[in-house]
Image: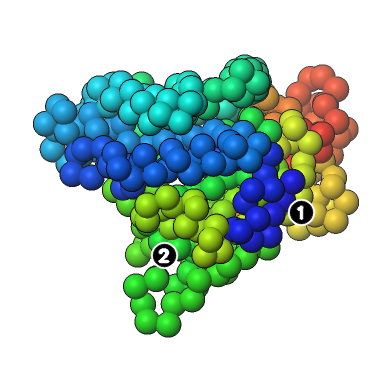
């Protein structure tokens, strides 16, 4: 079920609420009073029949303060991992306490990027979320920063929230920020206007999230929130950004009807929604104008004859990005060949491919059944 304004938030059946470090942690300590008012907000939503999933940052900030680490625990990967290990205990205890005060049971889930990029592990996470919600618990999710590396991590909890919403079959994602929503320019500039509703992420919308539009002390910012909106809109999920700085932030946003809503643009099937939401590609295929046109207008597969360049070192079944002749991303899909074979047959017709490969070629380099348009 979608909603068209912040005031209609109660129409959701299942909602993911994401909270950033800057809201949850102040000067190395938990912002306990604010969190108590948020927990009260969540309890009200539960009373209205809405199932709640929380995605919470804050472990690194809390752990860094307890360990006395400089730079908020982000000076090095080792510091961040150590801080997260200590902070996760504090964060889990904090949520358990504040939710229990309203009769809710918190359930901790630590997810890594690979947990949601790998199809089997994604389905396992989905099943766990479903069972927790069925049992009446409130899953509290965070990235498993104690083992995550710079190369293999979400890097921000905005995209994690969108991916968790997919896995949970949620209707909507609510991102609590330190600004009211998306502005047409840096909100600090005079004349900046809040955009109340976005119908699809375009290059013009992405350009509004400049470097000055950062949000908080963590690793996210407005750009990461727009990336989360792209994941959500392809999966039929509504995403909203509201200002979380006030006490009872959700109640305040609903009463004032203030924030930015990103409407779903399509509702891909479960597998294609998972595929379109994957973040890390192993390589890139560039296709010619004819292939690009066939993909866009007819939903065609990527044939070897239309491939003009192959980048990366991927294996068969890996995710690759497919770009048009101008370099703009068109789609993501699972490659039917490894990178070496792709390079050997790129630009060749089927009869020539067989001579190069020594066996009958597959129907496509990337089949449309294993591809999602961006």
Name the quadrant containing residue 44.
Answer: top right
Provide the residue designation for mark 2. Answer: 210
Q: Is residue 316 left or right of residue 57?
A: right
- Residue ID at (65%, 55%): 8
**N-term-proximal mark, 2 vs 1:** 2
Q: Alpha-carbon distance for marks 2 and 1?
A: 30 Å
- Residue ID at (33%, 45%): 34
What's the colour scheme? rainbow
Give x and y (percent) for residue 107.
Answer: 48, 21
Q: Dot 1: within a 10 Å radius of its alpha carbon, few (fewer than 14), some, or many (20 or more) residues?
A: many
Q: In terms of secondary structure, where does tag 1 sit? A: helix
Q: Dot 2: within a 10 Å radius of its alpha carbon, few (fewer than 14), some, or many (20 or more) residues?
A: few
Q: In terms of secondary structure, where does tag 2 sit? A: loop
User: Closest to the observer: 180 or 277?
Assistant: 180
Residue 76: assigned label: none
Give x and y (percent) for residue 193.
Answer: 49, 76
Q: Is residue 228 visible?
A: no
In the image, residue 31 sits, relative to residue 358, either above or below, namely below
Give x and y (percent) for residue 84.
Answer: 29, 26
Q: Is residue 66 visible?
A: yes
Q: Is residue 25 left or right of residue 352?
A: left
User: Closest to the observer: 205 or 198?
Assistant: 198
In the image, residue 8 sits, relative to residue 106, either above or below, namely below
Q: How many marks?
A: 2
Provide the residue designation for mark 1. Answer: 292
Name the quadrant containing residue 77.
Answer: top left
Looking at the rendered image, the disc whose residue lies closer to the viewer, 2 or 1, is 2
Residue contact at pointers 2 and 1, CB within 8 angstroms: no
User: Closest to the observer: 235 or 358?
Assistant: 235
- Residue ID at (73%, 27%): 336
- Residue ID at (82%, 26%): 361
């Amino acid at each position: 079920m979608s909603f068209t304004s912040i005031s209609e938030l109660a129409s959701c059946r299942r909602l993911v609420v994401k909270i950033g470090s800057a809201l949850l942690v102040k000067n190395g300590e938990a912002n306990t009073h604010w969190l108590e008012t948020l927990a009260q907000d969540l309890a009200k939503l539960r009373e209205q029949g809405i199932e709640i999933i929380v995605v919470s940052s804050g472990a690194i900030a809390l752990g860094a303060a307890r360990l006395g680490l400089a730079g908020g625990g982000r000076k090095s990967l080792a510091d961040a991992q150590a801080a997260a290990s200590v902070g996760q205990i504090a964060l889990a205890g904090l949520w358990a306490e504040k939710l229990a005060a309203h009769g809710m049971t918190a359930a901790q889930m630590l997810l890594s990027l690979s947990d949601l990029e790998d199809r089997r592990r994604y389905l396992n996470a989905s099943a766990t979320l479903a069972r927790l919600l069925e049992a009446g618990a409130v899953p509290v999710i965070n990235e498993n920063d104690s083992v995550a590396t710079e190369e293999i991590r979400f890097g921000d909890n905005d995209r994690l929230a969108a991916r968790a919403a997919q896995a949970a079959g949620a209707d909507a994602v609510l991102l609590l920020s330190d600004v009211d929503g998306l502005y047409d320019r840096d909100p600090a500039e005079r004349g900046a206007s809040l955009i109340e509703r976005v119908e699809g992420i375009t290059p013009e919308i992405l350009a509004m999230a400049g470097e000055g539009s950062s949000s908080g002390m963590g690793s996210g910012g407005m750009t990461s929130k727009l990336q989360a909106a792209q994941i959500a809109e392809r999966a039929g999920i509504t995403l909203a950004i509201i200002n979380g700085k006030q006490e009872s932030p959700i109640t305040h946003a609903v009463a004032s009807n203030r924030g930015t809503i990103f409407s779903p643009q399509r509702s891909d099937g479960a597998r294609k929604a998972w595929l379109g939401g994957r973040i890390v590609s192993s390589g890139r295929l560039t296709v010619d104008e004819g292939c690009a046109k066939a993909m866009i207008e007819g939903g065609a597969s990527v044939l070897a004859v239309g491939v003009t360049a192959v980048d990366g070192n991927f294996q068969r079944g890996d995710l690759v990005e497919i770009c048009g002749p101008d370099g703009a991303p068109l789609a993501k899909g699972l490659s039917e060949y490894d990178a070496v074979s792709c390079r050997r047959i790129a630009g060749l017709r089927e009869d020539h491919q067989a001579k190069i490969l020594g066996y009958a070629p597959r129907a496509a380099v990337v089949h449309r059944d294993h591809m999602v348009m961006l």
